[in-house]
Image (cartoon, grey):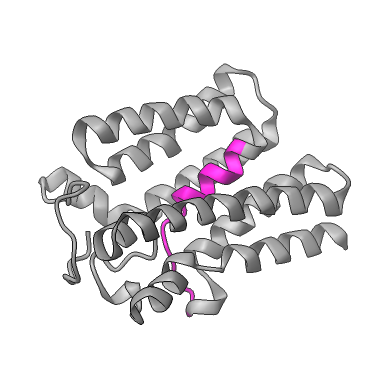
């Protein structure tokens, strides 16, 4: 029962879409109607600027971390419950019950979840993603690389099976949520970091 409660609470926590909440608080807008239409830190940067974007990014990471700790606490350290709680927070971020199931792409929350479950593989994949973003200025490409390489580093470092399964599911989530970005990357039409700021209605 406590395992189930942990997963449900983690989903509800993940459903707190901080980009939507902060955009409403700062400018009285629904951020999903501006910029790329995505409820995440990158679109917050595009629409609201650096300060709100940093706040969204850190808060989205924090809810992933907290979800894993909730799973740990309510299950008495059961690894599968911790993994499922982390996954539930990402599902909540992507499909939030509080906001008509239209949320973000879950990368920042994924960072929080995976860094808490297994720090070093997440760090290595994160550094690779950051390097790629710096070189190309494509946040979506860096996000996809992060999602794809985290399972690889987990295997290379011999981490437990629950973590590998979690990372593979998260990878599938990431590619699903970034499918329009993948098309734009292939077509050379994806927006680069810092290229736009404002309230345009493109779906980048």
Q: Quadrant of the C terminus?
A: bottom left
Q: Is residue 161 visible?
A: yes
* Horizontal arrangement in the rendering, residue 197 relative to residue 96 (left or right): left
* Horizontal arrangement in the rendering, residue 182 relative to residue 1 (left or right): left
- Which residue is rendered at x = 37% and y = 35% of the image? 145
Q: Residue furthest left?
A: 188
Q: Is residue 167 above or below residue 60?
A: above
Magenta segment includes 105: yes
Q: Which residues are magenta?
A: 100-115
* Horizontal arrangement in the rendering, residue 59 relative to residue 86 (left or right): left
Q: Is residue 22 above or below residue 70?
A: below
- Which residue is rendered at x = 39% and y = 65% of the image? 39
Which one is nearer the viewer's eye here, 19 or 188?
19
Q: Position of residue 49 (x, y in %)?
A: 29, 59
Q: Is residue 156 above or below residue 179?
A: above
Count numbered badges in the picture. 0
Magenta segment includes 188: no
- Which residue is rendered at x = 47% and y = 43% of the image? 171
Q: Is residue 102 visible?
A: no
Q: Position of residue 11 (x, y in %)?
A: 64, 64
């Amino acid at each position: 029962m406590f395992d189930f409660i942990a997963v449900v609470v983690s989903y509800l926590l993940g459903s707190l879409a901080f980009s939507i909440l902060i955009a409403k608080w700062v400018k009285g807008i629904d951020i999903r109607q501006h910029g790329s239409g995505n409820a995440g830190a990158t679109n917050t940067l595009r629409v609201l600027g650096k300060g709100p974007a940093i706040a969204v990014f850190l808060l989205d990471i924090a809810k992933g971390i907290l979800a894993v700790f909730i799973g740990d606490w309510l299950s008495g350290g059961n690894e599968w419950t911790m993994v499922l709680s982390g996954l539930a927070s990402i599902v909540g971020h992507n499909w939030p019950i509080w906001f008509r199931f239209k949320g973000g792409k879950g990368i920042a929350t994924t960072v929080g979840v995976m860094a808490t479950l297994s720090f070093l593989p997440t760090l290595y994949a994160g550094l690779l993603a950051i390097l790629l973003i710096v070189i190309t200025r494509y946040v979506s490409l860096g996000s996809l690389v992060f999602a794809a390489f985290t399972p690889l580093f987990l295997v290379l470092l011999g981490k437990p099976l629950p973590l590998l399964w979690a990372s593979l599911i998260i990878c599938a989530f990431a590619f699903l949520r970034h499918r329009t970005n993948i098309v734009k990357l292939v077509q050379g039409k994806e927006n680069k970091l810092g290229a736009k700021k404002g309230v345009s209605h493109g779906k980048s």
